[in-house]
């Protein structure tokens, strides 16, 4: 989508001045788009105000404090900007629902993040954030967390106390165990746990009745987790590159399954079963 100037003129003078200040700080223009890809620097309008702002692939020493004046902002992204700290001014944006800070050099998220009471989605993947702030528990609307590739080493316990959580990405984190407490995440629909060191799943996994997508690729599972057979809404399952010897015949009873990703060794060990599953409108990807 090409940039447009159709709506820019109706921005109030304060928001125009704020954008110009940010432009001077980053050393380039911030184009306006009616719609734009996540991978572009730009802004989009919402009801006559700046509703979405994305700064992408720039080395930033700092972010001007005046950004707090974009009071109608709903989505804010600083992607691959070499940020080492989260500016305090961001936490004054009370209406922000989506905050993306991936591919930076962050080592922590300040406790003041709980000031973003409207926050629904937090993307902090590809940083070095070893733990979540305790105040994240004060974000009652948070339903999506992308915390991949931060080297955390264990499942973050804070997630268990976020009752609206629907989507979690914890891939590439060196996680070895999934605690039983995961059972409380009854609204969870999607969890990405690939490229970890998980060798078993807890019994509580059977409580995830709303789970639709599960990625366990590149872990240490040697046996197919029977808990998965109880997940009646599971439509997408990835088990590739685990040393699982045999897939159980009961897999044929997973009626909602539509996408299955396994490796060639897993397929060869149970070819007839997998071929039968594939005939039941299941897309099987063998890698």
Image (cartoon, rainbow, N blue to C red):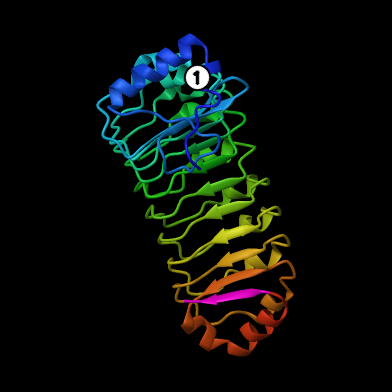
* Magenta span main SS: strand
Secondary structure beneath disc 1? Answer: loop
Q: Which residues are magenta?
A: 282-287
Q: Provide residue 255's location: percent of width, then percent of height.
A: 75, 70
Crowd rating for badge 1 (residues with CA inside 10 Å; few <14, some 14–19, many 20+): many
Q: Provide residue 130's location: percent of width, then percent of height.
A: 35, 40
Specify the quadrant of the image occupied by residue 20: top left
Specify the quadrant of the image occupied by residue 235: bottom right
Whether residue 36 sits left or right of residue 80 in the image: it is right
**Residue bearing the label numbered 1:** 93
Q: Provide residue 156's location: percent of width, then percent of height.
A: 46, 43
Give yes or no for residue 152 being in the magenta stretch.
Answer: no
Whether residue 7 sits left or right of residue 253 in the image: it is left
Above or below residue 226? Residue 76 is above
Give yes or no for residue 286 being in the magenta stretch.
Answer: yes
Return the residue found at the far top: 13
Q: Nearer the viewer, residue 11 or 184?
A: 11
């Amino acid at each position: 989508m090409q940039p447009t100037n159709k709506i820019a003129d109706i921005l109030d003078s304060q928001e125009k001045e704020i954008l110009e200040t940010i432009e001077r700080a980053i050393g380039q223009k911030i184009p306006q788009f009616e719609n734009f890809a996540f991978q572009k620097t730009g802004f989009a309008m919402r009801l006559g105000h700046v509703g979405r702002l994305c700064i992408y692939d720039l080395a930033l020493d700092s972010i001007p404090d005046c950004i707090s004046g974009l009071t109608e902002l709903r989505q804010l992204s600083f992607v691959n900007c070499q940020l080492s700290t989260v500016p305090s001014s961001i936490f004054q944006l009370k209406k922000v629902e989506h905050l993306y800070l991936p591919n930076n050099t962050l080592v922590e998220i300040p406790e003041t993040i709980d000031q973003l009471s409207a926050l629904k989605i937090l993307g902090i993947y590809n940083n070095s954030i070893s733990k979540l702030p305790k105040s994240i528990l004060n974000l009652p609307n948070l339903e999506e967390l992308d915390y991949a590739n931060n080297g955390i080493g264990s499942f973050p316990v804070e997630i268990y106390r976020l009752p609206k959580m629907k989507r979690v990405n914890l891939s590439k984190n060196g996680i070895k165990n999934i605690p039983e407490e995961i059972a409380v995440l009854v609204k969870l629909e999607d969890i990405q746990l690939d490229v970890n060191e998980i060798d078993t799943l807890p019994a509580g996994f059977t409580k995830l009745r709303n789970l639709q997508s599960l990625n366990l690729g590149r872990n240490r599972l040697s046996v197919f987790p029977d808990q998965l057979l109880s997940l009646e809404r599971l439509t997408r399952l990835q088990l590739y590159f685990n040393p699982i010897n045999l897939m159980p015949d009961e897999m044929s009873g997973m009626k909602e399954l539509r996408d299955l990703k396994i490796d060639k060794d897993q397929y060869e060990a149970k070819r007839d079963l997998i071929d039968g599953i594939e005939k039941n409108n299941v897309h099987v990807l063998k890698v």
